[in-house]
Image (cartoon, helix red, strand yellow):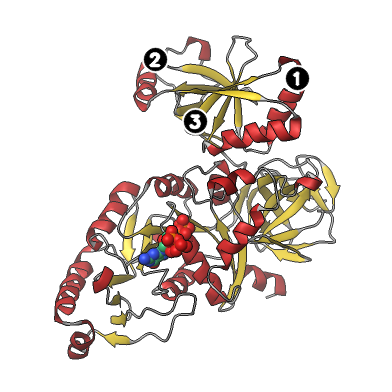
């Protein structure tokens, strides 16, 4: 096996999804700690804060105490080269969060044991399902009082529609938390609260066969309950099936406490064991295998103005095949240009490391003078194929935009179009009315503030936003077969078109969506657009 295939096969690229406060940052920190990428827990947050000082419009994030931009962390562990794609943790997250999932090969879902499945987890989970990537669950905060374990699993199965397979099982929670039972090894790993920020100590493993010892360590009450639960569990839970995990139909579940550093390394080990090497990708020439020699990548995210002084944009690419070498020439397919990628870098929290080589599975950021768009393909100069595009996800908030000074129409249109091209917002126009009004749709409301701020600061255009009541947007999947003008909708429905001229429908509530489908037989509506 040549060196580059070895390098590719040891790569694991995953995203962490969770509702804010479930413990994603804490868990990530502990992963990095095991990998030796950081020496002290707390550094991830510290760096994120430092980064905010770099650019101006990110001032908004700083003021609100949240992070809108997602970064990529790479570290080594046990021979693996791991790429973690961080997804913004606030409810005001943006479409970027969804797009990040397009670059991952699997997802880790962190759930707070006292809260269960929460809104943001549900949304992100939907995108993972659409991609059929494996999902690994870490149920966190067992050192605090938790919901009943069977109920938690039941909730995941019912709410998210994925079968669960507990890899281990918690013994009590909160003050009564005694550790976890490892189902494969049939032993109990006793809880020890190691100091925050240090690696897990050597865990005490007690085989359940050795009942006396078990009772001595965790007490009679906990032992009775555990033995009863093991019996129930072995009878009731889904059989472990790696194929079902790989196709995203079954999620392995681990329990622990990221803060007190318990169960994290066990989870990481199980996870790395089960997750796959970089996945093949669909292109117009067929499936491209990651181990193919020729380099190829696609752009999944563009971040503007990371450094305002240089007005730079960074295009984030996921390498899909082969090896990237900074000195090589590549083809930007959509721009039909052969070029060298400028200043390829890996972005680790706030640090940018210029890199000379990278492999399929890795994420690189390159300087973008304004030529790349989300979904673009980069490949070898002799090739000319395109990866399947990144879907446009449904915005959930809408507003009408008006410019305050109508004389500045040109700057206004230029600015809003450029910001839309970067993918921070989506813009729509009313169908057939000829009105020059623009409707903006965003996934997270914070993007409205970002839009206003950027138009003022970068394009010198002041705008006013008037919120619209729409919450549901649907693309017409069979637009060739449907005469949009003749669609019979509900009174609250609005017909609009996107930048590419695709017709869309906006609705105030989901009832209207159903009603419109009922009234127009044959109409097929979609929550995202692949055009
Ligand atoms: P997020 O990235 O998913 O938003 O969550 P984050 O890791 O920032 O954790 C949110 C809060 O939950 C933090 O407390 C964190 O310390 C706490 N936490 C994370 N994992 C555990 C756990 O296993 N057990 C317990 N008891 N708490 C946990 P905070 O007070 O909001 O912040 P901080 O001041 O501790 O940083």
Residue 440 pos. (x, y %): 58, 27
Query: Which quarter of the rendered image does ligand 1 occupy?
Result: bottom left
Residue 83: quadrant of the picture: bottom right
Q: Is residue 430 left or right of residue 186?
A: right
Residue 408: image tag: 1
- SS class of the residue under badge 2? loop
The residue at 72%/45% (across/down) is 305
Mark 2 or 1, nearer chain start: 1
The residue at 19%/74% (across/down) is 226
Q: Is residue 161 left or right of residue 53?
A: left
| Location of mark 3 (residue) | 397
* Residue 38 in the image: above or below residue 421: below
Crowding at label 3, few (<14), some or many (≥20) Cα neighbours within 10 Å?
many
Crowding at label 2, few (<14), some or many (≥20) Cα neighbours within 10 Å?
some
**Mark 1, mark 3: which one is toward the viewer?**
1
Q: Do tag 2 and tag 3 residues touch (Cβ < 8 Å)?
A: no
- SS class of the residue under badge 1? helix
Residue 503 pos. (x, y %): 56, 21
Residue 295: image tag: none
* Residue 526 in the image: above or below residue 157: above
Q: Nearer the viewer, residue 366 or 414?
A: 414
Marks 2 and 3, how far apart in space? 19 Å
Evaluate whether residue 438 shows in this view.
yes
Marks 1 and 3, how far apart in space? 26 Å
| Location of mark 2 (residue) | 490
- Of the 4 image quadrants, the one containing the C terminus is top right
Crowding at label 1, few (<14), some or many (≥20) Cα neighbours within 10 Å?
some
Residue 232 pos. (x, y %): 17, 68
């Amino acid at each position: 096996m040549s060196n580059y295939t070895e390098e590719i096969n040891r790569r694991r690229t995953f995203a962490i999804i969770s509702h804010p406060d479930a413990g994603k940052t804490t868990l990530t920190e502990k992963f990095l700690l095991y990998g030796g990428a950081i020496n002290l827990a707390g550094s991830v947050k510290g760096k994120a804060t430092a980064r905010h000082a770099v650019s101006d419009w990110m001032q908004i994030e700083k003021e609100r105490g949240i992070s809108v931009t997602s970064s990529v962390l790479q570290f080594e562990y046990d021979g693996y080269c791991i790429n973690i794609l961080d997804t913004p943790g606030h409810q005001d997250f943006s479409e970027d969060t969804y797009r990040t999932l397009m670059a991952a090969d699997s997802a880790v879902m962190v759930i707070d044991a006292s809260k269960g499945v929460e809104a943001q987890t549900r949304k992100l989970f939907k995108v993972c399902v659409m991609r059929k990537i494996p999902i690994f669950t870490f149920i966190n905060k067992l050192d605090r009082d938790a919901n009943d374990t069977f109920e938690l699993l039941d909730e995941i199965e019912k709410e998210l529609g994925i079968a669960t397979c507990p890899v281990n099982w918690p013994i009590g929670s909160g003050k009564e938390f005694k550790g976890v039972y490892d189902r494969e090894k049939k032993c109990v790993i006793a809880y020890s609260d190691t100091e925050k920020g240090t690696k897990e100590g050597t865990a005490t493993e007690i085989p359940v066969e050795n009942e006396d010892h078990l009772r001595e360590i965790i007490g009679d009450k906990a032992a009775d309950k555990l033995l009863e639960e093991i019996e129930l569990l072995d009878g009731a839970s889904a059989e472990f099936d790696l194929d079902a995990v790989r196709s995203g139909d079954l999620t392995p579940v681990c329990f622990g406490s990221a803060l007190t550093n318990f169960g994290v390394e066990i989870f990481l080990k199980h996870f790395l064991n089960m997750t796959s090497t970089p996945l093949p990708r669909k292109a117009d020439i067929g499936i491209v295998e990651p181990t193919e020699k020729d380099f190829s990548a696609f752009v999944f995210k563009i971040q503007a103005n990371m450094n305002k002084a240089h007005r730079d944009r960074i295009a984030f690419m996921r390498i899909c095949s082969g090896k990237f070498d900074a000195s090589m020439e590549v083809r930007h397919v959509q721009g039909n240009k052969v070029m060298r990628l400028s200043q390829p870098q890996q972005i680790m929290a706030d640090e940018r490391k210029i890199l000379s080589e990278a492999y399929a599975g890795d994420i690189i950021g390159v300087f973008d003078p304004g030529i790349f768009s989300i979904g673009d393909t980069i490949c070898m100069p002799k090739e000319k194929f395109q990866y399947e595009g990144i879907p446009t996800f449904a915005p959930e908030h809408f507003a009408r935009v008006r410019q305050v000074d109508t004389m500045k129409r040109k700057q206004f249109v230029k600015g809003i179009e450029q910001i839309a091209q970067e993918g921070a917002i989506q813009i729509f126009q009313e169908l057939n009315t000829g009105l020059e009004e623009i409707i903006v749709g965003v996934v997270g409301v914070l993007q409205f503030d970002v839009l206003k701020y950027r138009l003022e600061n970068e394009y010198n255009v002041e705008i006013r936003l008037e919120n619209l009541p729409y919450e549901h947007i649907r693309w017409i999947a069979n637009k060739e077969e449907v005469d949009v003008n003749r669609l019979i909708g509900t009174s609250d429905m609005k017909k609009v078109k996107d930048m590419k001229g695709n017709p869309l429908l906006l609705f105030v509530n989901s009832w209207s969506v159903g009603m419109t489908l009922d009234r127009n037989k044959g109409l097929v509506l979609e929550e995202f657009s692949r055009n």
